[in-house]
Amino acid sequence: MKLSLGPVLFYWDKAQLGNFYAEMSALPLDVIYLGETVCSKRRAFSLDQWLGLARELQTCSQAQIVLSSLTLIEAASELSSLRRLCDNGQLLVEANDMGAVQLLAERKLPFVGGPALNLYNGHALGQLLDSGMIRWVPPVECSAALIGDVLEQVRDMEREVPEVEIFAYGHLPLAYSARCFTARAENRPKDDCQFCCINYPDGLALSSQEGQPLFTLNGIQTMSGEVSNLLADYNALVACGADILRLSPRAQGMAEVVSAFDRVRQGEAPPLFVEGCNGYWHGHAGMLKVEEAGLC
């Protein structure tokens, strides 16, 4: 089992990003994803700076470095940046929308199919395999049973199953919108947001009327209120056919998270209970902790 570090989904400044990746480079990670996936207005790093960071990480880490594309393309300038990303000539790209898939397929380049691609059956997966996809990150709402069914459909089609990377830790990215919810929360127009996302390094928490964590607002992205944590489900992840577990960055405590997953993959028994939700993995409402709800 491999461990990957997903792209930073929140808006951090250049110093915080630099310090974070300096810390991560010393950890037992097999894949590190770099790049801005949420909002093109976030320019702590330019594409050239992301490429420079990739080169630095390649010299001080054994991890494979992958560039992640923007998820929602809304302007010609963003499409131009996407073309530059696909033409980087050095690194594998994670495609997070079908525009990226098309550009990479036209260039006959292999790519990672990101979690924002809506792939829910073997035939859809087959289309992306034909386009050059070599690794699949299922949508975060997919259960273990659904992922197993999709992979079985691929085998029934006598196709080679791609690498499977499961989103195993972090706030789940649930939806994207042309509207910026963080700007709206601060009564700012999207066109003059003042980059207010930077005030919320782990997103803006949104609770229900009962005070229960409901969502996390992250610019145009709506995320889960609770952190998803599949560490206690490690054996089921192996049985499902997962090759890589994705750990999505948070502002604090990521070294401890990586260490916990690493110890379990090295043979330590998975914990019976962990902080966070795992409902989607078990085919229930995503916000549930199925152990506490008595559903497993």
Image (tube, rainbow, N blue to C red):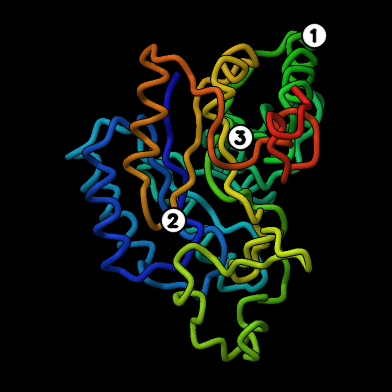
x 47%, y 39%: residue: 247
The location of residue 136, given as percent across then percent down, is: 61, 31
Q: Quadrant of the C terminus?
A: top right
Three-letter residue code for mark 2? Gly
Please tell me whether mark 2 sits on a helix, a strand or a loop: loop
Query: Which mark sits nearer the N-terminus, 3 or 1?
Result: 3
x 22%, y 50%: residue: 22
Q: CA distance from mark 3 to mark 1?
A: 20 Å
Query: Front-most of 84 and 172?
Result: 172
* Looking at the image, residue 35 lies above or below residue 46: above
Please tell me whether mark 1 sits on a helix, a strand or a loop: helix
Query: Front-most of 266 and 15?
Result: 266
Q: Quadrant of residue 176?
A: bottom right
Q: CA distance from mark 2 to mark 3?
A: 16 Å
Marks 2 and 3 close (CB-CB < 8 Å):
no
> Dot 2 corresponds to which residue?
35
Three-letter residue code for mark 1? Asp
The outermost residue toward the left is 60
The location of residue 39, given as percent across then percent down, is: 56, 68
x 67%, y 83%: residue: 184
> Dot 1 corresponds to which residue?
156
Query: Front-most of 275 and 219?
Result: 275
The location of residue 115, given as percent across then percent down, is: 64, 42
Query: Which mark sits nearer the N-terminus, 2 or 3?
Result: 2
Give the crowd class for mark 1: few <14, some 14-19, many >=20 residues within 10 Å.
few
Marks 3 and 1 close (CB-CB < 8 Å):
no
The circle on residue 137 is: 3
Tell us which disc is closer to us: 3 or 1: 3
